[in-house]
Image (tube, rainbow, N blue to C red):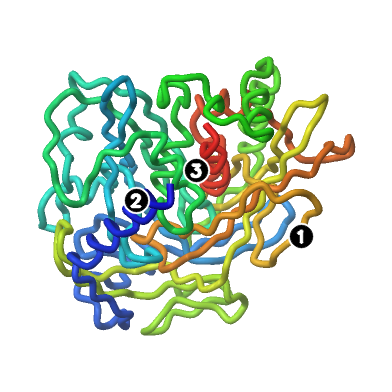
Amino acid sequence: MKSRIAEVVSWLKQITKSSHVKKSFISFGESLEWSIIRGSLVHKSGGFFKIIGIIWTNNHREKISQPLIDQNEIGTLGFLARRTNNLTELLVQAKVEPGNVGLAQLSPTYQATLSNSLRFHGGIFPPFTEFFLQKNNLHVLYESLQSEQGLRFFGKRNKNIIIYTHKHVENIDTHRWFQVDELTELLHEPYLINTDARSVLVSSPWEKLINRIPFTRYETIFAKELYNSFVSIGRKEIVSKEINKLSRMSKKINRPSIVELDKIPGWTVSDKEIGTSLSDEFNVKQIRVTMLGREVDFWDQPIIYSPKLLYITLLCGRRNKTLYFGFKYQIEPGLYNLIELGPTNMSYTNNLYSGQLIVKSYQSEEGGRFYQNKSVYKIIDIGEIEKSSKLIWLTLADIHSLFTYEGIFTNEARSILVLLLRWI
């Protein structure tokens, strides 16, 4: 296992070195491609994305004002898959992004906005575009729309997809085939697998991906508990209840209002950043990038700069000897439906929960929009669940059923749930 990790790290370093990345923060006035027009920071083509301002009154009557990334296009996050010796392999990309920790991370085969696919940048097509824009005569294992971070994006969704192919796939240095088990073994490693790959993996039909009953690979006590939770009697009424409740609650939540960037209360637009003195959680900067191996070799863009470490926690516990996981309703102005199921807790302070630490994993958010935005994910076993708990407690069978629907779990919930696939 250690040798495999070392091999992957070596490959990522090799791709990073060959990309000859140079990056630097610049002023908005130095940008050759972006400018503030009618109160929003936009690209000269009108494509890609823009930075807007919002004002929102949440259900607690608290006013929230901030910039958000507005990207109406539905992006595609997709793996090509093939069967080799009765095992599923996924074509994994070593993708370099200016904001990634370590620059190169493992990503889906194809990770592109519609603007990239349509070459708004004037450069070349992303590799393997033909598989994902024209899916005729290809076996789609699954396809679903999933959300981005609701505190940073405005209604953004991506198409998560896995496509089986029997066609010849060109060998290129930035892509390698991984057995699914090889990939899941890397899920706990820091800063190796990017957000988008984690989302596609956890949203997929697990049993079809591995071609066996999930959570039967290992014989540890926790692995057996995961298996029992996965094969527990499906609670259709719970799944239906949560879907209906999310729908009802969504209709009662206020929608945010879009405002010009210089009209966001408490925020200022300077030549160097869009920032606020009210919080040090994030600001918006402009970054200039030179990089070989991308659709274009030189560009600049806005990027979310968030220097603080975000702590994301998911509690697990037992009822009648069955393992459950505790979620809460996450209401955020940028979620497409304004509400989804989120992890137990998200905070910039390290909340201490009593219990056994099952896994702790450091990850960063997608480096094409976020600059070294780091999070630490923790799954904690609290033992028996108290009857007074107000969390939404779900078995793995419930979670698996809910993943057949779109827009149920937040990006952060998906990124912490995927850590369980290490035992799949």
Type of amino acid under label 3 = Tyr
Mark closer to the observer (3, 2): 2
> Which residue bears the numbered disc 1?
352
Q: Which quarter of the picture shows residue 260?
A: bottom left
Looking at the rendered structure, the secondary structure element under dot 3 is loop
Q: Position of residue 315 (x, y in %)?
A: 72, 44
Q: Which residue is at 46% across, 75% downward? A: 262
From mark 1 to mark 2, how far is it between C-alphas? 31 Å
Q: Which residue is at 55% across, 54% downward? A: 256
Q: Residues within 10 Å of mark 2 (few under 14, many from 20)?
A: many
In this rendering, position of residue 158 left or right of residue 215: left
In this rendering, position of residue 115 left or right of residue 4: left
Q: Residue 106 carries which label?
A: 2
Q: Is 25 placed above or below 115 here? A: below
Q: Position of residue 22 (x, y in %)?
A: 24, 75
Q: Which quarter of the picture shows residue 131?
A: top left
Q: Residue 336 carries which label?
A: 3
Type of amino acid under label 2 = Leu
Q: Which residue is at 33% across, 53% downward? A: 8
Q: Earlier in the sequence, mark 1 or mark 2?
A: 2
Q: Earlier in the sequence, mark 3 or mark 2?
A: 2
Looking at the rendered structure, the secondary structure element under dot 2 is strand
Q: Can residue 338 be seen in this view?
A: yes
Q: Is 136 placed above or below 55 here? A: above
Q: Position of residue 328 (x, y in %)?
A: 70, 43
Type of amino acid under label 1 = Leu
Q: Position of residue 87 (x, y in %)?
A: 33, 25
